[in-house]
Structure formats: C-alpha cells, structure tokens
Amino acid sequence: MTPIRVLICDDHGVVRKGLRLQLEQHEDIEVVGEASDGRVAVQLAETLRPDVILMDIGMPNLNGVEATSQIAKSNPDVGIVILSMYSDEEYLLRVLNAGALGYLMKECAEADLDRAVRAVAQGKSFFSPAIQAALREDYIRQLRQKGLTDSYDLLTGREKEVLQLLAEGKVNKEVASALNCSVNTVATHRMHLMQKLDLHSSAEIVLYAMRKRLIS
C-alpha cells in the first residue's frame, strides 16, 4: 500500500512537531516535508508533490489562503486542509474559493486530523464538526431573522443528487458519469439548483451542503 504523502505547513515548530507525531502513528500516512512560511510551502508543494497539504491560515511572508490558491492552480490534484482558529463563514468561503478541500479547527485537529487527511486524499471535502454545527446554527438564525424557509424541498430529486455530488467535489463530467447523463444536463441542473437556493459559486454549494448535513 502506497502511503498518503503529507506536507505540513505551520509557522510554529511545536505545532508542526505535534502534527507530525500524530500522523506518523498511522502506517498509511507519511510526512514528506515541513514549511514554516507560505512561500516555502509553495516551493515544497512544487518539488515534493505531496498528496495532502496541511496549511495554517496565518502563515508569514505569504498567508495560507494565497499559498493555497497558488498551490491549487499549479497542482489541482493536491488535497489542501486549512488549519485555523476561526469558524466563521467568511474564512470558509475564502479558502474554498482558493482551492482547499478541508478546514479544521486547531482545537479539534487531534481528533479529526487523520480522517481529514484520508478524506481529502480521495478528493473529498472534510470539515471539523464544530464548523458544521456553527454553520447550521447561523443558517437557521438567518432564516428566522428574515422570515424565510429553507428552499431545499424546492429541488427535484435529480437536482438533489447533483447538489450532493457537486458538494463532494466532483466536476460536471464526473457527475454526468455517476448519474449516466450528459454534461449539458448536469450543467442545467446545476444552474437551476443554484437559482433555487440563491447560491453563486462552488464554495457556496459546499457550505450549503454542510449546513444540510449532506457532506461531512
């Protein structure tokens, strides 16, 4: 079995050491490098070509969001997990738009780290349970304040299937293959579900799916 190759990026040596020690307890995970700032992270991502990158959002010289964006553009197959102390939606949207697949609260990293690495290595999204709970609570609060109801039940069965697959990180071609339909059909379903749910980007699709507990 080929181990999952991980690059750890954090400006605190103690944090990097702790993450390495935890990951190296698993035979299917191998730490191949460490970076202490964002620019080094980008360079090592290019030279080491890891399967997964753990990226602190507050990196010096080049912040974690920008480093993630540069890495994702040059190597779209890498799974990037953001490590952060913040759970608000603004940060989530920024990192998802930059190309991250996972988002872990540092306080929860010990419990969720290996599951997150394995998930994003397979191209799936992964988010700390605390983040999912916060998003669901905030979403319900917003609906109540605006006197609105959730539009999920307005979706057709096929639109719900497309939403699920898109939220899991699949592109239109992969969704079409999974549902045995054309790419154009998927694009139409995507357009309709985004209109019904008032969503405007792939990142917002993922966040909505998290609120609805469609993905973990």
Image (cartoon, rainbow, N blue to C red):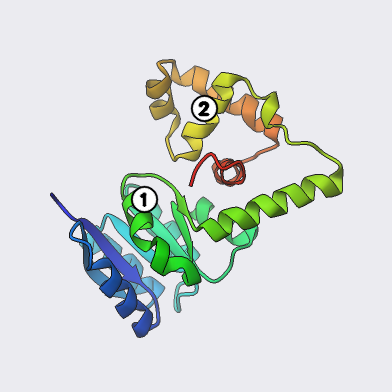
What x and y, as percent, mark residue 69?
Answer: 45, 57
Query: Which of 169/126 is in front?
Result: 126
Tell me: residue 96, above or below residue 66: above
Q: Amino acid at mark 2?
A: Val
Q: Quadrant of residue 87?
A: bottom right
Disc 1 residue crowd, few under 14, some 14–19, many 20+, Cα 10 Å: many
Whether residue 75 is visible here, answered yes or no, is: no
Question: Disc 2 on helix, strand or loop?
Answer: helix
Residue at (72, 32) in percent of width and height: 151
What x and y, as percent, mark residue 154?
Answer: 70, 25
Whether residue 88 is visible here, answered yes or no, is: yes
Residue at (57, 41) in percent of width and height: 209
Q: Amino acid at mark 1?
A: Val
Question: Disc 1 on helix, strand or loop?
Answer: helix
Residue at (39, 52) in percent of width and height: 73
Which residue is disc 2 drawn over? 162
- CA gap between label 2 and label 1 equals 20 Å
**Quick check: 170 left or right of 145?**
left
What x and y, as percent, mark residue 147?
Answer: 86, 42
